[in-house]
Amino acid sequence: MDGEPLVRWYWIGDHLAYLRDLTLDHAVIALVPVAIALAVAIPLSLACARFPRLYQPLSAVFNVVYALPSLAVFVVLIPYTGLATCATVMVPLTFYALAVLLPTAVDGLRSVPESVRQAATAMGYGPWHRLWAVELPAAVPYLVAGLRVAAVSSISLAAVGALIGRGGLGYLFIDGFQRTFPTPIVAGIVLIAALALVTDLLLILARRLLAPWAVRTGGAR
């Protein structure tokens, strides 16, 4: 890339629609797995809170998956989910997000003092009413803290999917390296960072709306 300027602004101006489409595609690939992982993590965390011996085996399994290189997992899945498909990228990202969300959800449920549970029961709350009115709200700051980590990690890892034909903004890195043209690479870095920042800010806002008491008291960070 000797002699080539870091950014050619005319290229960015000529490719705004292309960059927008890649950003939207990247957001779907990266954030849908996080939403699926959240939907799975909540019932799993409830089961772990109810049966504590279940937590360690589940946590160990997800930690092992989290330790696997993402590209290797993508390649292993290709014979089953196909090349250049969303599923090939999103399945591993879902497990990676679960590895982050499950511990935070369990910690959130465990953070409710037993005296609070007993008080809710004494006020006539049944198990389900107590769960929705007391235990899950108390876990919100922990869940959002886990979501922030999981979402930013997923946005970063999704770019690797471009190596197997489905990676959103990751295409810009491959394009730039193949053509020794740094402008797409810089654009990809900036857009991934911006997407991660916007997502993180939205999650912070969600925590303020769903658990305002956590903001006043410091909450889970």
Image: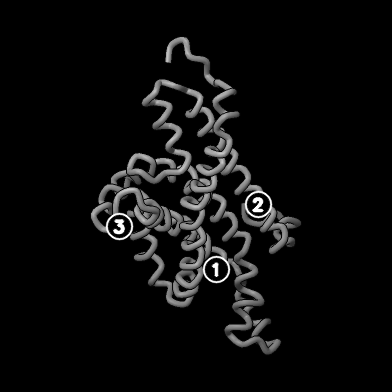
Q: Residue furthest top?
A: 3
Q: Residue furthest front?
A: 14
Q: Residue furthest right?
A: 216
> Which numbered marker is on residue 81?
3
Q: Amino acid at mark 2?
A: Leu
The correct choice, above or below, for 127 with respect to 77 in the image is below
The correct choice, above or below, for 28 with respect to 160 in the image is below
Q: Where does label 2 land, which residue? A: 202
Closer to us: mark 3 or mark 2?
3
Element on which disc 3 rests: helix
Give percent across and percent down for residue 10.
58, 23
Instruction: Return the disc, 3 or 2, that comes first in the chain's sequence.
Output: 3
Q: Nearer the viewer, residue 205 or 67?
A: 205
Closer to us: mark 2 or mark 1?
2
* One can see residue 193 in this view: no
The correct choice, above or below, for 191 with respect to 179 in the image is below
Quadrant in which the N terminus appears: top left
Q: Amino acid at mark 1?
A: Arg
Element on which disc 1 rests: helix
Q: Where does label 1 land, which residue? A: 110
Crowding near the residue tagged with mark 3, few <14, some 14–19, many ≥20 C-alpha atoms within 10 Å: some
Measure the C-alpha gap from mark 2 to mark 1: 26 Å
* One can see residue 78 in this view: yes
The correct choice, above or below, for 41 with respect to 50 in the image is above
